Image: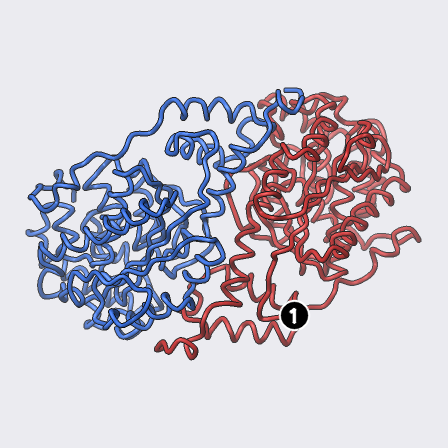
Chain colours: A blue, B red
Amino acid sequence: MSFKPSAISPWDKWLEMPAAPFNMAELKAARARQMQLTKPPGSLGDLEGIAIRLAAMQGTQQPELARARIVVFAADHGIAAEGVSAFPQEVTGQMILNFARGGAAISVLARSLGATLEVVDVGSVANSGAMAGVVVQKAASGTANFRHGPAMTEKQLAAALQAGRDAAERALRDDAQLFIGGEMGIANTTAATALACALLGRAASEIAGPGTGLDVAGVARKARIIDEALELHRAAITSPLEALRHVGGFEIAALAGAYIACAQMGLPVLVDGFIASAAALVAMQIRPDAPNWWFYGHASAEPGHVHLMQALDARPLLTLGLRLGEGSGAAVALPVLRLAAALHGQMATFGDAGVSQ
Amino acid sequence: MSFKPSAISPWDKWLEMPAAPFNMAELKAARARQMQLTKPPGSLGDLEGIAIRLAAMQGTQQPELARARIVVFAADHGIAAEGVSAFPQEVTGQMILNFARGGAAISVLARSLGATLEVVDVGSVANSGAMAGVVVQKAASGTANFRHGPAMTEKQLAAALQAGRDAAERALRDDAQLFIGGEMGIANTTAATALACALLGRAASEIAGPGTGLDVAGVARKARIIDEALELHRAAITSPLEALRHVGGFEIAALAGAYIACAQMGLPVLVDGFIASAAALVAMQIRPDAPNWWFYGHASAEPGHVHLMQALDARPLLTLGLRLGEGSGAAVALPVLRLAAALHGQMATFGDAGVSQ
C-alpha cells in the first residue's frame, strides 16, 4: 500500500512545517576535518559519518550530547482485550510507577547515562495523576479495541500527537541536545504491527512477533487478529494519519509527533526499536524530511523490525538482542553517539601532532 | 595446523598457571535475579548474559566497571621494510607521542570514558624514553624482518609477554575492574595476519586485509609475502609460542601476556579488534581457560577478523566498521558492559515494584 501526502485539516497544520535545515558549511568542514584527524581515513567506520552529521546538526566542530532527554510515553490499548499480550493490562500503570520511582530498565539507564527521564501518561487506564513524577496528558483512558472500530477519534489522535510535540518542546526548553523516545503499553506490539502492516502493505504474518513473550501459537493468533482488523479498516485507511488513527496507539502517535517536532526544531533524535520505528515510519510518511534528524539505536529482536528499518533506510547502531522497549535500545546506543562526537571535536590533526601522512 | 600444548621452559612457567575460578554461587544468584527484574524474561538480550558473567567474575550482584584501564602497547616490525603498510615506520613513534599527549583516538576515548590510559613502548625504534607519560619496557628496538628469519629471539618473546603481564599487574594494583589492551605498530596487521594464518592453518589470501589503507594490489602483495614467510618458518613453528616468536610482534606478545595474566588474576578483559584478537587466539592456545575472563568489543572491518572470532567462539558486542586498533573498538564497547552491570544491580524486581508477572 502506498499513500498520498496526508490530507491536512486545521488541527494537524503544524505537521506541514518542514524539518530544520542542516548547517552545510559545518557539514563540509566536518568532512574535511575527519580526513585530517590522526587516524587512517575511514578507520573510525560509522563513527565518522555520525560525527559529520552531528556537526551539521549542531553547527559546530565540537558537537556534544552531554544533555540527553529520555521521554517514555505510556498508554493502554483496547486490543489488549483480545489476549494478545503475555502480561495483563494492569502492568502498564504498574510500570508507569516503576519508571517514576527509578526501578525500571530505562530509569537505570537514564541515571547511568546522566540523561533526564520524563514519564508521560498519554493514555493509560491507570490513575497515574496520583503518581509523583508523571506528566499526565491523556488523549483518553486507553484506545478503543481496533478489532471492532477505529482505535481513536480524530480529536484523540490530535491530542496524542500534540503530547509528543509538547514533550519535544520541553526537552528543547531544558537545553537537551538529543531526544530519545520510549514507550510502554500492554499490547502495543500488536498496534505497532498493525500500523507497520498498513504502512508497508504487508501481511501480519510477515511482521508479527512474540512481543513480551508470546509462544508460536500466540503469535499466529495475534497475526490473525491483526489481519482481520486491517481488512475491517482497509477502506478507511487513506493516509498515514488515518492508519495511525485506526490501528495505532496513543504512545505511538506521541512518538511520531515528538519525532516530527524534534526535526522541525532541529533537535537530534535517537530512535529506539520496533514500536518506536513504527512511529518513525508513520512520521516519515507524514514529513519525509524529518528522518534527516534521526539516528537509529538498536536492531530489535522483534522479527518485523528489519522491514521497518528497510523502509526507513536505517542502519541501527547496535544489535544486542534487546526487545524491551521503553527507549532502552536507544539509551544503550547513546554512548556511541557521544564518543563519535568527542573523537571529532578532540582528536589531534596530523598537523597538530606532527604525524606523517 | 593444530598444536600440542606449548613446551614449557623455565622463563614461561607463569603461563602454566590456571585462570581464576568464577564465583559459582553468585553466578547462580545472578541467573535467578535476571528472571525477577521488572522486564519480560530475556528482553534485555545479550545484556543479561553479560551481567551474569560480570556478577560471577566480581562475586557480587552489584557488578560495576567504573574503573577501567586501557593500555596501548606500541612496537615496530622488521617486516615494515617490505613496504606492507600505507604509512612509514616513523609513525609508530609519532603516535606514541600523540597517545601520551592526549590527541589520539584512544586518548579521547579514555578521557570520555573516565578510563586511565597507559602507553607502553614494548619495542619501537623511537626514542620514547624522552617522552613524558610513556612506560618504556622494550624487548628490542623493533622485531627482525620475519621474511628472512624469526621475528624475535626467545629472550625477546619472554620480555614482551612479561611486559604485558606487568601492565596487567599494574592495572590490578590500581584497582582496575576491567582491562582493555590496545596496540600500535606500523605493519602490525601483517604480523597479526601471519600469526593468525599459522594458528588457524589458513592461507594469507583468506585473512589479509587493507590494514591502514592498502589497495587491492597492496593486499595481494602483503598476502604473498606472508605466505612465503610462513613457508620459511613452517618446520620451526611447533607451538603457539613458536608461532608468536617467528612471525608475531612485541605488542602482540604483550597483549597475549596481558590477557593471560588478567585471566589468572581474575581481572575481566575487553578484547579489541583484529590484532588484539590474534593475540587473544595465541593466548587461548597457550591457556585454554583464559577466555572465560574475556569479552569481545568490536567486529573489525579487517576481513580476517571473522575467522579469529570463530576460532575464539566469540561474538563481538559492536559492529561499527572500525579498523583503527589502539583499543578503540573495545573502548567504544565499554559502555555496553557498564550499562549491563548497572541494569543488573539497580533494577527493581517484580516483588519490589509490585508489578504483576
Q: Which residue is mark 1?
A: B59
Identify which residue is drawn at 12% across, 59% down.
A152
Q: Is residue A70 left or right of residue B119?
A: left
The local secondary structure at tag 1 comes to loop
Is B161 in front, or is A200?
A: B161
Identify which residue is drawn at 23% across, 72% down.
A126
Q: Pointer 1 indicates a residue of which chain?
A: B
Q: Residues within 10 Å of mark 1 (few under 14, many from 20)?
A: some
Residue A301 position, x and y percent, is 39, 57
Residue A220 position, x and y percent, is 26, 65
Q: Is residue A214 visible?
A: no
Q: Residue furthest right?
A: B10
Is B29 in front, or is A162?
A: A162
Q: Is residue A92 above or below residue A242?
A: below
> Disc 1 marks which amino acid?
Gly
Residue B237 position, x and y percent, is 82, 42
Q: Is residue A182 left or right of residue B254?
A: left
Q: Is residue B175 left or right of residue B62?
A: right
Identify which residue is drawn at 62% across, 70% down.
B60
User: Image quadrant of residue A98?
Assistant: bottom left
